[in-house]
Every structure is written in structure tokens, then in C-alpha cells.
Amino acid sequence: MCSFCCPKCRESLRLEGNGYICPNGHSFDKARQGYVNLLMPNRRHSSAPGDSREMIISRRRFLESGKYDIFSDKLNELTANCLNSCRENTIVDCGCGEGYYDGRLCEYLDKLKIKYKLYGVDISKDAVKAASGKYKGVSFAVASVFDIPIRKNSADVAVSVFSPMAESEFYRILKKGGYLIYAVPAARHLMGLKEAVYDKPYENEKKDTAYKGFRFEGRHSVRGEINVSGEEAVDLFKMTPYYYKTELSAVEKIRGTGAIKTEIQFDFLVYRKEEAETYEDF
Ligand SMILES: [Zn+2]
């Protein structure tokens, strides 16, 4: 069994009335959309950490065009391969955003008649609000991927798509032998879009694949090419980290460029939690 746990004492939360409560009496309200806010105040967070409402709207609009479905399809397939069809599986999407990949994962697993509980956490309240308003088969919470409100040794699969690598926290929540599916941008991901903005765009760095406590199982590359223009190109740009770092004129440049052809490339890195305890007890 798995459910969200109390961010203060890590005991299991149970639903009572309109909220969640742990055995030590810590309680958390359930929002109208169904999610629970389990993000603890932290000096390092801003008052509204994570993606803004504007970015969430752009992301949802872009993803619903289906242009990233080659990635969602691969994530579905890889996740299903890590599950045990004889029992209920626990999956945690660490940095779930507005929930598009979770919604499609539910549809896919339902079709295969695989039993699961899917949890999604994201530090952006606006993202979680949008996710829980739309995808009712998933339990969503506002939380940091560095402090996931899931009990230790309880997840069969942890998924992280373009979110920070929180290796010790992923290690903590996974069962021994559990899988981590970590999606990262490959070298030429969005190169065409970057060329529309920058004179000399750089390729993405190839990420290191070694993480403490995990055995690397393999890299699954997905490559495609898409055409975007106008507002859709702007939506795509807003999904990237470059949006934070680039002047507003870049957005105008993209909007005015016309059709942009760009490579899209994800690498899915699959890991397994090592059998031996690597970290100190949590
Ligand atoms: Zn508690």
C-alpha cells in the first residue's frame, strides 16, 4: 500500500473529511480540484516556486497538439515494461508538470489491464492545480522532488521527465530493484528553435549516467522532427529553460520567424535501484 505521507513526520496520511491527517495530528487541506499541498516552507523557495500559470497554459496547449506524443508513447512503453502485471504497482512522477504524460500513461496502462496507483508531484502549485483538474486517475500533490511525500521503499517506478535529478530522494522512495526512468534532452533537441533565437546555439551536454545507488540499465533514444510557427513556437519556447534566460525580444523573434523546423530528441535513461543499501537509513 502506498499513499502520500506527512511531510513533517513521514507517517502515512489518510483522508478524513475535507483533508488529510497523519497519526501525529498534522493535517493538510484537500483542494477543490483534488490535490493536496504538501510543500513545506523553505527559505530557498520563492513564494510561488516552479512554473508560472502562463507557462503551464503554454505547456498544456503545446503538448495537446500531440507533437511530443512520440516521447509519451516511449515513456508508456518503458514504464509498462518495468511493472508487474500480477499486482498493483506504485508509480511516482517526480516533477509531473500539468500532468499530460500521466494522463496518457493511465490510458495506456488501463488498456493493458495493468493495476497501478499513480502519484504526481510538482513544486508548481499552478501545474498541480491544472493536472488534478483534468486527470482524475492520478493522485497529485504540491511538493519538491527533493522532498517527495512518499514513504521509503514503496515505489515500483519513479519517473522524471526533464526535472531535476534528486538521486538520494528517488533512491529513498523506490523499492529495492525498483526502476527509475529519467528523461533528458539529447544533444540536438530543439536545435532548429534555438537557431531561430541565437546566432551560435550550443548542443545540449550529454548527461553523465552514473548515480549512486543505481545500476544503469540502458539508454532509449527517441528522435523526431516537427514544424512549429507563431504562437505554437512561442509555447514550445516557453517550455524550455532558455525562456528564463532570454530577453523578451527572443519571443518576438520566434513569433515573427514563420515556420520553424526543429529536431526533437529525448533520451530515456533507465536505472534500477541496487539491492544493497547505499545510503544511510532515512
Ligand atoms: Zn505528521
Image: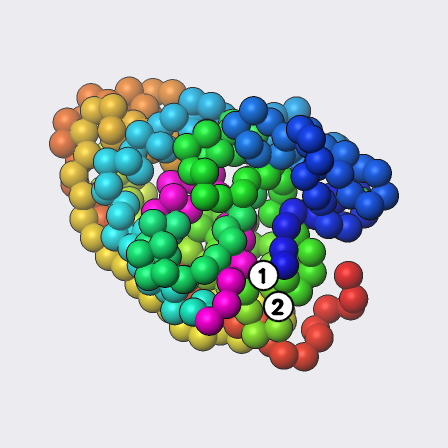
Neighbour tally class for label 1: few under 14, some 14-19, many 20 plus, Cα within 10 Å:
many
- Pick out the residue farthest to the front: 17
* Residue at point 15%, 27% (across, down): 258
- Pick out the residue farthest to the bottom: 276
Neighbour tally class for label 2: few under 14, some 14-19, many 20 plus, Cα within 10 Å:
many
Q: Which three-letter amino acid code belongs to the residue tagged 2?
A: Lys
- Indicate whether residue 88 is drawn in magenta: yes
- Secondary structure state at the residue bearing disc 2: strand
Vertical side of 256 occupied by 242: above or below: below
Q: Is residue 71 left or right of residue 165?
A: left
* Residue at point 63%, 40% (across, down): 143
The disc, 2 or 1, on the residue closer to the chain's N-terminal end is 1
Q: Which three-letter amino acid code belongs to the residue tagged 1?
A: Ala
- Return the x and y of residue 238 as percentages of the image width and height: 37, 31
Vertical side of 17 occupied by 189: above or below: below
Q: Is residue 143 left or right of residue 190?
A: right
- Return the x and y of residue 239 as percentages of the image width and height: 38, 35
> Which quadrant does the C terminus fall into?
bottom right
Q: Which residues are magenta?
A: 86-104
- Indicate whether residue 17 is drawn in magenta: no
Q: Are marks 2 and 1 in contact (CB under 8 Å)?
A: yes
- Secondary structure state at the residue bearing disc 1: strand
Q: Nearer the viewer, residue 139 or 175?
A: 139
Vertical side of 203 occupied by 29: above or below: above
Find residue 253 and report its image quarter: top left
Residue that badge 2 annotates: 175
